[in-house]
Amino acid sequence: MEIDRALDWLQNTQVASAIGENEILFPWIESVHVLAIVLVVGTIFIVDLRLLGVASLDLTVRRVMRDVIPYTWGAFAVAALTGSLLFSSDAVHYAHNRMFQGKLVLLALAGLNMGLFHLIGVRDIQRWDKVDGRTPIAARTAAAISLLLWIGVVAMGRGIGFTMH
């Protein structure tokens, strides 16, 4: 396959080889990746739980989003970078791993869900965003879907380590 040749080239680059062959480099990158994912998921859960009316009810949704989303994006950038480095170390095997494929699908769905929420759900936020206010069903639905997708991303990510041989 054409894609396997490209993946083989990627995993044979100097950086990927160093990560794959070094006993210390891979675990350090993986640790930073896991910490970044914890921050991504944690900050997303803060927003989602506010949208669901479960937490931070003394703050408006806009305030919660303004306070935590910059951390989400910063952590996501670190997670994407470290994840790419980990992937490069054994690209052919990762690309054919079902858990890895599932994680990517769930990541894409989480991104789509977030995009739709920010495109449609936030459109009239000034009307419904009140302290102790109930969010519209569409926003609560997007939050519930987000929680489920991110739990799936974490579960699939955890499963990758058990299915790579």
Image (tube, helix red, strand yellow):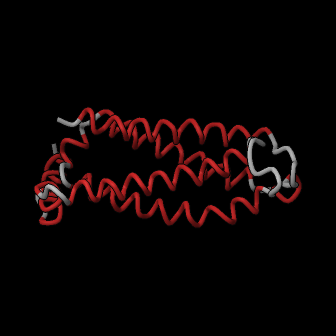
Which of 73/101 is in front?
73
Quarter of the image for residue 12 reads bottom left
Residue 78 left/right relative to 139: left
Residue 5 versus residue 134: which sits nearer the camera?
134
Residue 88 place in picture, x, y as percent: 22, 55
- Image spot of residue 52 (x, y percent): 74, 41
| Relative side of 90 to 126, left or right | left
Q: Is residue 116 left or right of residue 8?
A: right
Residue 20 is situated, as x and y percent measured from the top left of the image, at: 15, 54
Please, is residue 9 above or below residue 14 in the view? above
Seen in the picture, residue 145 relative to 25 is either above or below; the reply is: above
| Location of residue 144 in the rendering, given as x and y in whole percent from the top left corner | 65, 37
Q: On the rendered image, what quadrant is the C terminus found in?
A: top left
Quarter of the picture holding the N terminus: top left
Point 37% across, 55% down: residue: 33
Residue occupying the point 24% across, 37% down:
96
Left or right: 163, with 153 as reference point: left
Q: Residue at x 75, y 41 (%)?
A: 54
In the image, what residue occupies the spot 42% across and 55% down?
35
Count of numbered circles on the image: 0
- Quarter occupied by residue 159: top left
